[in-house]
Image: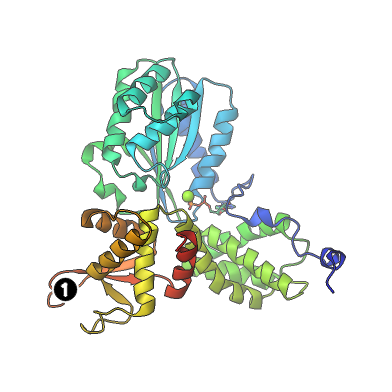
Amino acid sequence: MTSFQEILSKKSLFKDPSVLSPHYVPSELPFREAQIKEIMEILSSALKNQKPRNLFIYGKTGTGKTCSVKHVMDKFNNYDSNSVMMYLNCRIYNSRYRVLQKIMKQFVPELDKSGFGLPFFYEKLVEELGKSKQLIVVLDEIDMVKDLDELVYTLTRANDEVKVGGITIIGISNKLSFKNELDPRSRSSLYEAELIFPPYTSVQLQHILLQRIGIGFENNCVEPSAINLAAAITAQECGDARYALKLILKAGEIAQQNGRQQVTDEHVELARKKVELDLAAETIALLPDNLKIVLYAIASITQNGSRYSRLDGLEEGFLFSGEVYEEYAKVSNILHKKPRSVRWYKEYLNDLEMLGLLTSTPSGKGVRGHTTLIKLGYPAADIVDLLKHSLHL
Ligand code: ADP
Ligand code: MG
């Protein structure tokens, strides 16, 4: 019989596994000193009560954008001043209304009750800024805001209206094409200053891993060659520090489960397969219901075999946009939700593609006229499992 004593007396490889979680913000961010300094220099004018330039930060996933900005935010908000910096993730606050509501809630807690209109928030905002406040709003994953041009316009107008205070936007995105999609007026306001975060190299990732392993693992529990392998795999795949950290955390868990004293190359290889799916699961958990349903529709058709694609001689795994829409509508009905129109559905496909959950290509002429072909980015069975659970199907 297993006893708790037996389980607890087993030596753990980890000192503190939470240090390896993506939510942990390390106190030191190597290789980002220059970027952090630049952000601080730009924001420093707010501390002299002058409006800083708006700043746009671009870089691929896991290049340290979010943690660098949060790092600066801690320092900024601990500095005694009339200024406030706040952070919003636009996956959640994805419209002008939601962003303004969230900003204003911080000043006026009673606004938590809903039912206020945009003009009300706008007036309150101008009133608050007019108390000579400098407000810095970080809009992380800013490309997720549906009516961004309108949001930028509204915030810029609020700035023009106040004489003493001001509002500054720090936009963050990992979408390269984003700049071109903006209307020229919002582009020139958002990009008053621009900062790029390059992907980490293998050597930099080794260093980042070593730093975290030192706090997260017990001494000498990870073989140096396993660290180098994790860094090399990551650099080759994406240069995403989050990926490297997950890889080493999973490798540690696997070693632990197998009762090993050390994490080796073999554990890193085994971890690699799990990590990709894990990252997808995290993204999926944050999706709004409609996007989940579309993704579920794609995965379940892929799993059960498309009725049409074989007929039309499509390559394995590709689906017609139209059949996915039908399935989306069907599943929505099962869930007692009204399916959105095709126009919205196309937006959803766009969003899912941007998150790397699917790829789409135009069908070209001949195959059912012009249509879009869709292919799931991960194994269908895994995605079906994940979503069945989270949609309560
Ligand atoms: P992004 O916002 O660019 O996608 P994040 O800032 O979320 O990336 O960073 C992803 C993960 O990698 C976080 O867990 C963070 O702690 C870690 N990380 C990123 N850059 C560094 C760095 N320079 N040093 C240590 N850890 C880092
Ligand atoms: Mg980020």
Q: Residue at x 46, y 29 (%)?
A: 112
Q: Residue at x 27, y 32 (%)?
A: 153
Q: Residue at x 15, y 75 (%)?
A: 368
Considering depth in this image, is 32 or 355 the residue closer to the camera?
A: 355
Relative to residue 87, is residue 7 drawn left or right?
right
Considering depth in this image, is 336 or 216 the residue closer to the camera?
A: 336
Quadrant of image for the C terminus: bottom left
Q: Quadrant of residue 248?
A: bottom right
Considering depth in this image, is 196 or 164 the residue closer to the camera?
A: 164
Q: Residue at x 55, y 65 (%)?
A: 202
Position of 148 relative to 385 (above/below): above
Q: Quadrant of residue 372?
A: bottom left
Position of 100 relative to 19 (above/below): above
Considering depth in this image, is 72 or 194 the residue closer to the camera?
A: 72
Relative to residue 335, is residue 68 drawn left or right?
right
Q: Is residue 263 visible?
A: no
User: In the image, residue 95 lies at what x, y percent?
Assistant: 34, 40
Q: Quadrant of residue 228?
A: bottom right
Quadrant of image for the N terminus: bottom right
Question: Where does label 1 land, which residue?
Answer: 364
Colouring scheme applied when the structure was drawn: rainbow
User: Is the residue at mark 1 in contact range of ligand 1, meaning its CB lies under 8 Å from it?
Assistant: no
Position of 178 relative to 356 (above/below): above
User: In the image, residue 342 lies at what x, y percent?
Assistant: 22, 57
Q: Amino acid at mark 1?
A: Gly
Position of 13 relative to 80 (above/below): below
